[in-house]
Amino acid sequence: MLFDTHTHLDQEEFDDSRSDVISRAKAAGVTQVVAVGTTFSASRKCVELAAEYSGVFAAVGIQPNYIAEAELDDWQGIEQLVGQPGVVAIGETGLDRYWDFTPFDHQQDYFDRHIRLAQRHDLPFIVHMRDCNEEILEMLRDANRRSPLKGIMHSYTGDQAMAQECVQMGLHISFAGMVTFKKSHELREVAATIPWDRLLLETDAPYLSPEPMRGKKPNEPAFLRHTAECVASARGISLEELASQTTANAVELFQLDKS
C-alpha cells in the first residue's frame, strides 16, 4: 500500500472525475491521500473531501502565491478549520521567489503564522519552496529554536546538505514526480540518502506527472507507483519495502495510528 502525502484533489481538474480518480488510486494500491489546501476556500473543500471519501485526509493553509488575494478573515477561517475532522496537517505554506505574486515579507509573515499554528496544535506543516532555499532554512532555524519542528519538505528539489539539515530539525522529506525525470540524477542521489524513517512520497496531483506518464494531464494519485518504483530503485530496495516504510512514516507523522 502507498500513501500519497500531497495532492490537490479539490481542484477543478478533478471535478468531473474525482470519484473515479480515487477509485483508480485504490486499485493501484494508493489507499490513503492528503488533499492539500492552497487558499481558504480550497482548504474548506479539502475538509469536505476528507469527510466524503474514505482514505482522504486534509491539510489546511494558504500557499504563498495566493496570499496577496486572501481576504482579511481568511486566516481566521484557516484557524477554525484546524479542528475539523480529517485535518492532519497545516499548509501548504512556505516561500516562493520564482513567481512574483505576493510581496516576500508577506510570504514570510504567513509562513511564520502557519508554523506557529502547527506547533500550537501539534500538527505537521507542509513546506513549499522555490528559488529561496536559504530563506526557508533561516525561518525553519528560528522556528526550531522556539519549539521542535514537525513537518514535510514538499516536492523536494534541494540538495543533500539542505535535506540533512531539515532532517536534523525534525522534518520529513517528500519526493514527487520530478525525482523520476531523466535529468534528475542528483535528486535521485538525494532520495537515496534520506533516513529511512523520514522519507515520504507524493504526486502533487494534478501537477508533475512522473515518468513514464510525464506530459499526461492531470497527474493523479494512481501514478504514485511510478515515483515509488524510481525511489526504490535509487535506494536499492524492493517496491514493497519502500511502500511499507513510507506508508508507516506518513501514518505516524499524521498521527493516524492514534485515531
Image: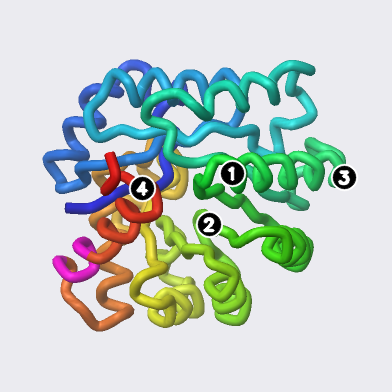
Element class at badge 3: helix
The residue that mark 2 highlights is: 150
Colour setup of the view: rainbow
Q: Which residue is mark 3?
A: 105
Name the residue tied to disc 1.
Answer: 118
Compare marks 2 and 3 and give the one earlier in the sequence.
3
Location of residue 170 with respect to 57 vertically, above or below: below
Corner quadrant of residue 148: bottom right
Q: Considering depth in this image, is 147 or 238 the residue closer to the camera?
A: 147
Q: Is residue 21 left or right of residue 177?
A: left
The residue under label 4 is which amino acid type?
A: Gln
Q: CA distance from mark 2 to mark 3?
A: 23 Å
Q: Which residues are magenta?
A: 240-244
Judging depth in this view, the residue of 210 and 5 nearest the camera is: 5
Q: Give the percent coordinates (x, y) of residue 121.
A: 55, 40
Q: Are marks 2 and 3 in contact (CB under 8 Å)?
A: no
CA gap, disc 1 and disc 2: 8 Å
Tell me the amino acid under the disc marked 2: Lys
Query: Between 4 and 172, which is closer to the camera in this rendering?
Result: 172
Instruction: Residue under label 4, please give it.
Output: 255
Q: Which mark sits nearer the N-terminus, 4 or 1? A: 1
Residue 122 magenta-drawn?
no
Residue 137's image quarter?
Answer: bottom right
**First along the sequence among labels 2 and 4:** 2
Q: How many other residues sit within 10 Å of disc 2, few (<14), some (14-19) or many (≥20)? A: many
Dividing the picture into quadrants, the one containing residue 231 is bottom left
- 4 or 3: tag closer to the N-terminus: 3
Question: The disc labelled 3 sits on which kind of residue?
Answer: Asp
Q: CA distance from mark 4 to mark 1?
A: 13 Å
Kindly identify the residue that appears in the image at 87 percent across and 45 percent down. Answer: 105
Confirm or deny contact between disc 1 and disc 2 (CB under 8 A). Answer: yes
